Amino acid sequence: MPEPESELSSREVEHVARLARLGITPEEVTRYRDQLRNILHHIEALNRADTSKVPATAHPLEERNVMREDRREPSLPAEAALRNAPSRDDSYFKVKAIQE
Amino acid sequence: MKLYQRTIRELHQMLIDREISSVELTDAVLNQIDLVGDKTKAYLLVTRELALRQAQAADERLRAKRDVRPLTGIPIALKDVLCVRDVASTAGSKILGGFTPPYSATVVERLEGEGAVFLGKTNCDEFAMGSSNENSGYWPVHNPWSLDRVPGGSSGGSAAAVASGEAIAALGSDTGGSIRQPAALTGIVGMKPTYGRVSRYGLIAFASSLDQIGPMTRDVADGALLLQAIAGNDPRDSTSSSRPVPDYLATLTDGVKGMRLGVPKEYFVAGMEPAVEQSIRDAIRLLEQQGASIEEVSLPHSDVALPAYYIIAPAEASSNLARYDGTRYGFQAGGGRNLIEEYMLTRQQGFGAEVKRRIMLGTYALSSGYYDAYYLQAQKVRTLIIEDFKKAFEKVDALLGATSPTAAFELGAKTQDPVAMYLNDIITIPANLGNVCGISVPCGLVDGLPIGLQVIAPGFGEEVALRVAYAFEAATEFHRARSPLMGAAA
Amino acid sequence: MRALEAVTRYEVVVGLEVHAQILTQSKMFCGCSTDYLTAPPNANTCPVCLGLPGSLPVINRRAVEATIRTALALNCEIPEFSKFDRKNYFYPDLPKGYQISQYDLPFSRNGRLEFDLNGEAKRCGITRVHLEEDTGKLLHEGAIHEAQASLVNFNRAGVPLMEIVSEPDLRSADEAREYVMRLRAILQYIGVNGGDMESGQLRCDANVSLRPAGQTEYGTKVEVKNMNSFRAIHRAIEFEIGRQTEVLDAGGRLAQETRGWNDARGLTVSQRSKEYAEDYRYFPEPDLPPLDVSREWVAQIRAGLPELPAARRERFMTRFGLSPYDASLLTSSKTMAEFFEETVRLGAPAKAAANWILGDFSRLLNADRKEIDEASIKPVHLQQLISLIDSGAITGKMAKQTFDAMYRAPDPGPALEAARGSTQISGDAELDRIVVQVIAENAKSVADFKAGKGQALKFLIGQGMKISKGRANPQRLDALLREKIS
Ligand SMILES: [Mg+2]
Ligand SMILES: [Zn+2]
């Protein structure tokens, strides 16, 4: 795997597209590679900030321990749960075989 | 004056005085949509029947004087990232084509409770990713002030609807400026509340730690009213704050006398149009004349807000958008030989270019070997931005600056250059990362195009931002200007 | 046999990942029912557990407390700060495209599970216990490899799931099986898990590797999945040890891979040739605020912990004089331990109760794959049977037949009564003689009873049963004694 500071390669674009399950044509690989390189080049500015003593903020929230009690609430009627399914079989969602 | 040109408060008075009915009002707005909808393309879906049904119900309430609220009978547009039960909801994306949620967003339920009337779902950049509305998976939106210009984004449809008389008010969502920037570019008021102030339940997520729903209105008081109706804790959104919601109207007219207002020097960015800068300077001077003391402040990490945003938002988006795989709802490509191929085809065809670009960027930033350099570093920068705001708000009550460095640009002007497009949000993004609130209020016209003054207040200080914006508005006439499509105000 | 050979030349290293569904009413992040076994497909789903756009999770407090409870029972440290993370991957049973799990700040770490195997004390480190959500279930149309389509049921999606990760401290298939049995007992004792492996309430994956005896670094590990019984765990690990030994002996290299246990064929099969290494892109779940786990909260959860198997085992040994072996077996299941204690409380001698439970009773239960609390025989029945034997009323051989008959019947009462009745004395003349003898021989107890000590009557009835070799009708005895004494 290349160093983070080296330029994004076409192979990495293909790898990332596959991780994200995005189909991508060879032309798109080149186009996205160039665009992402340009964006990443601007993002390098992040390293201008001295963060050596700074904690990360994942949550801007002041809330903590937000929980619900273990109580049942009505589920959707099965028909409402399934009505948007592009393919279904009876009350199941139907998907293509997984075969890797 | 036409009904569709009026504010919520004016119409509310007319409704309770029985001068007009909600059905009449709704008809007037629907007629305006019929008249100019083809020009603005503000709506993806007009829910005419639903609107008239709700208007009738509102009239019942008004007639019986039963539970009449400030929004009862008022026609409102909803950005298409908000789920409405049994109404197609697409987030501006092909991948959600045909999806009708079996539930409503909390804000939608609250507005229903108020007796508001839903006109339909407004166009937006796909999954709220964009600053011009040109990334809509369906069609671009045109600015009512100049149809060859963008309305801003991503809540461009909501902004255009309010600015063209196709809605009295609207809800938008703001992840990096998506309410404030289009509000500025269409001459209306738009507010991004503090993260946690408004429930996100039922808001189709773009970036979960940044998204916030807010009002888009003709003036500041309407904004306060609409915010009042949607703000507050929601047990279905664990990130919604349990802080009590103040009465925003109670302090709205208190003025700025004695207030300390800061001007961040970093907000006068390179590339800002001189005319925009001049209007902002004039606006600041005006507030000083109103009795505020003005001082220059510094938000030293403003220059790294944009890069931090373009890591954090795409990273969260790459995960939030993983669910669109064509198996449970929405678009399914068909034709894949197995499931993985099917996923890849569905997502290739269902998502537009900008969404795919951000999914890839976010996936890359989170992937093994890059997490620390990008995602973690961005989160640390986020801490610095929060600190910047905290320090500034030790000295001043609110901050002033432009909303957008330029007025509305021409359609197509920036579509070839993602980075140029991203720079539009350079002065709105820090408020999302820094977890403060911001409002954009009209502050002038440049070559016939509106621009906005941005007021930023501390986290959960919405009443401060509203009060400053109101003081500015009360002393100026900018908010009375109407787009050519809406017609001149009386 | 191959496994046995391996022990001499290679050291076996096993670590286990156990997924345990938490017994809650509602799911981990929504109010849907957790009953996924009997509900019609997709009937227990909602926008949250279907991953519909805009839906948001809310944490189930009981699931968090059950996780901390488990961690405390496994002697873990409970950090003061914890959070949820997203584990990103695509699979049709995963509705959001990510699983809400815990990555770097789980609810607990650094625990241990102690057990004994064939009289030898063992200790296995617990790396962590964390909380996550279960996935939906796939049904394949036809055989898995030829299937054209899969059917998806999301009723199980979002059921709270604990992941209990062990250190690679286990050194044989026996140890691994024993560890899981002990762990299961603990989870049942503290009421957090149903313990049924076949239905998937408890699932186990094993990381198995070998290294030359004496070497400190670990060999290439193979992850074995799909073992849904104790027997399967044992067989699968034995098989892997054999397979890996053959590869290593032949000078080959093992592939780091995931293999599935095929119970019917008795072997493991490679499931994934890893073209790409998994990259889960964990990051903090932005939809859930983190948790401060206060010491008061932990203390409160700790105070609610019942006696754990290890402590109960000690108590059974000291209090009842049971052997370590019997005490271990009896405490391996909460229901069995409770059955035993109740039988003894009702008056049965401990040793006899233990023998019956671990002997005939367990044999019959195992054959039927039943738990002790599913049997019609209750402690009161066993106690009465034992008392019939002890009093000499029936022979050991008769008792075995009676027990069998009691076990088979939906109501054990008649079989027990038949055994008793075949010898029972109900005639007042004969009973009178017994009562007279009891009163004559136990003057002190008679006086005590007269003085109002109710306990004394129980003793006198016992004496009467003894004289009659258990054949007296205790109700009649009771009545006659009261009559005669007052
Ligand atoms: Mg797991
Ligand atoms: Zn649910």
Image (cartoon, coloured by chain):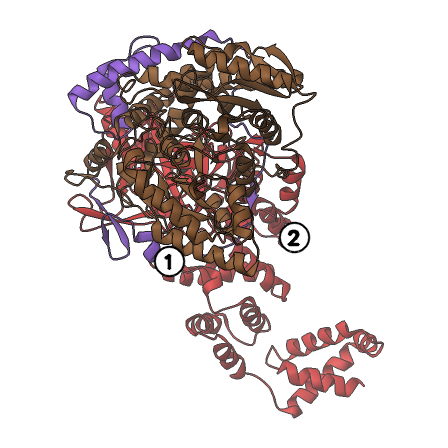
Chain colours: A purple, B brown, C red
In the depicted view, which residue is nearer to us: C38 or A53? A53
Q: Which residue is the site of mark 1?
A: A77
Res B321 label: none
What residue occupies the far front of the structure in this picture?
A: B490
| Chain ID of residue with mark 1 | A
Q: How dense is the environment of label 2, judged by Cα within 10 Å: few (below 14), some, or many (20 and up)?
A: few
Q: Is residue B191 visible?
A: yes
Q: Are marks 1 and 2 in contact (CB under 8 Å)?
A: no
In the depicted structure, whether residue C349 falls above or below residue C216: below
Residue C135, quarter of the rendered image: top left
| Residue in the picture at 58% in, 19% down | B399
Q: Relative to residue B66, is residue B129 drawn left or right?
A: left
The residue wearing badge 2 is C319
Find residue C63 and report its horizontal and vertical position in percent. 52, 45
Q: Residue at x 48, y 45 (%)?
A: B106
**Image quarter of residue B243:** top right
C-alpha gap between disc 1 and disc 2 = 55 Å
- Give the quadrant of residue A95: top left
Left or right, residue C416 beside residue C250 = right
Looking at the rendered structure, the kind of residue marked 2 is Arg
Q: Please state the chain letter of the residue tagged with numbered disc 2 in the rendered image.
A: C
Residue C338, position as x, y percentages in the image? 56, 58
B68 or B177, which lies in front? Answer: B68
Q: Amino acid at mark 1?
A: Pro
Q: Secondary structure at mark 1?
A: loop
Q: Give the vertical position of B438 relative to A97 (above or below).
A: above
